[in-house]
Amino acid sequence: MKKIILDCDPGMDDSMAIVMAAKAPELDLLAVTTVNGNYPVDVTCVNARKTLELLGRTDIPVARGMANPVIRKSPSDPFTHGKDGQAEANLPDPKMPLCELDAVDLIIKLVKENPGEITLVVTGPMSNVAMAMIKAPEIKEMIHDIVAISGMFGLNDYAFMNATGDTPQSEWNVYVDPEASKVVYESGVKLTALGLDVATYFDVDFTDDQLALLEKSDRKEAAFLANAVRFVRGRGFGAYCAVIDCMAVAYAIDPTLVETFDAHVGVETKDGLTLGMTVIDRRHHFVWEQLPLISIGKKADCGRFLKLLLDLVLA
Ligand code: BDR
Ligand code: CA
C-alpha cells in the first residue's frame, strides 16, 4: 500500500478526493490535512471531517492547517461550492475531534516517521506543505514524492478557457498562494503537477445511467457525488467541476492514467496580469535550467479515470 497524506481544501471536489483516498485499497491514507483555499480553513476542517464520518472512517486524523497563504491575504473563490462548500449536501455536523497537532506539524511528524515512503497528494493551495518545508527543511529529502492539482501549462484550450485563478492564465491553487507553490516547486522533491490541462476535461461526464446508478446505491458517498454533479450542472458548469481533485488521487493509485512529461517551470509571484502563472520553458535552446524540473500532466485517460472513480464510490 502506498502511504499518502491528502492535503486539501474541501470543497466538493476535494471531498470526493477524500472519498477516493479513503476507499482505495492501494492507498494507506495516513491523514487528511486541511488548508485555506476554496473556503476558509475552519470550513475546510469541518468538511473534511463530515466526509470521513460519512464514510465511517473517523480513524483517519484530520489536522487544521494554514488559515492564510504564507505571505499574502487570501482571495475569496468566485466559484461556488454552495453554502456548505459541499454542493449543499448538508451533511451532519462532525463529531470527530481535530488532531491535536496542526497540519504543518502533522506533516513533519508523519514524514519523519516514514522516511522515503510518503506521497503528499495536494489538492489545495500549497501553504501547508511549503510551511512544513520551511519549518523542517530536512523533510524534503524524506518525502517520496508530491502529486498535486496545480498550475495550468497552456497545453490545450480547456486549460485556457477554464483557468480557475483570478488572472487570465492561472490555476486557483497556485493563484491563492503563489509563494508557497514556488517553495514547493523549487524544493527538489519529485513533483507531478496535474494542471488544468488534464483536470478540466470535458470528456469527463456522467451518463444518465451512471447518475441513476449512483442515486440507487445505498452508499452515502454515491448520493453525495450525484448531488454534486447535479449541483454544478445546474449552475451551468461541466460535471468535471465536481471531481477535479480526484485526478490527483487517481494518479497516486495508478500513474498510468495520466501521461506526463518533464519540463522546467517557474511560478510567477509578481502581482498583476500574470500572478500565479506557471511558466513552462520548453525551448530547445537557451532553456532556463535554473527553473525546477517537474513532471507535468499532458493527457489523461478520462474513461479509465471515471471508471476508477465510480467503482470506488460504489464499492
Ligand atoms: C482547483 O481549484 C479548486 O477550486 C479545486 O478544488 C481544485 O483544487 C482547480 O483549479
Ligand atoms: Ca481543491
Image (cartoon, rainbow, N blue to C red):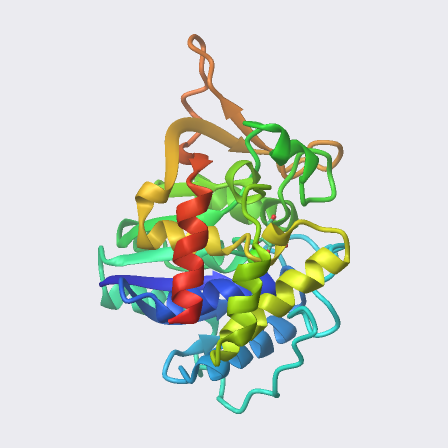
Residue 187 position in % (x across, y down):
39, 43
Q: From what the image shows, is residue 205 above or below residue 107?
A: above
Residue 80 position in % (x across, y down):
74, 61
Residue 65 can be seen in this image: no
Q: From what the image shows, is residue 95 above or below residue 17?
A: below
Closest to the observer, 216 or 117: 216
The structure residue drawn at horizontal position 60% and vertical position 65%, both measured from the top left corner, is 12
Q: Is residue 22 left or right of residue 3?
A: right
Residue 81 position in % (x across, y down):
69, 64
Q: Is residue 220 left or right of residue 232?
A: left
Counting the numbered discs, the total is 0
Closest to the observer, 176 or 123: 123
Quadrant in which the N terminus is drawn: bottom left
Instruction: Tell me where residue 158 sits by quadrant.
Output: top right
Residue 89 can be seen in this image: yes
Instruction: Tell me where residue 113 sits by quadrant.
Output: bottom left
Q: Is residue 227 left or right of residue 76?
A: left
Closest to the observer, 138 or 315: 315
Q: From what the image shows, is residue 12 above or below residue 167?
A: below
Instruction: Tell me where residue 57 sits by quadrant.
Output: bottom left
Closest to the observer, 314 or 114: 314
The structure residue drawn at horizontal position 58% and vertical position 75%, both measured from the top left corner, is 47
Quadrant in which the C terminus is drawn: bottom left
Q: Residue furthest bottom?
A: 95
Q: Residue furthest front?
A: 209
The structure residue drawn at horizontal position 32% and vertical position 45%, both measured from the top left corner, is 255
Residue 224 position in % (x across, y down):
57, 72
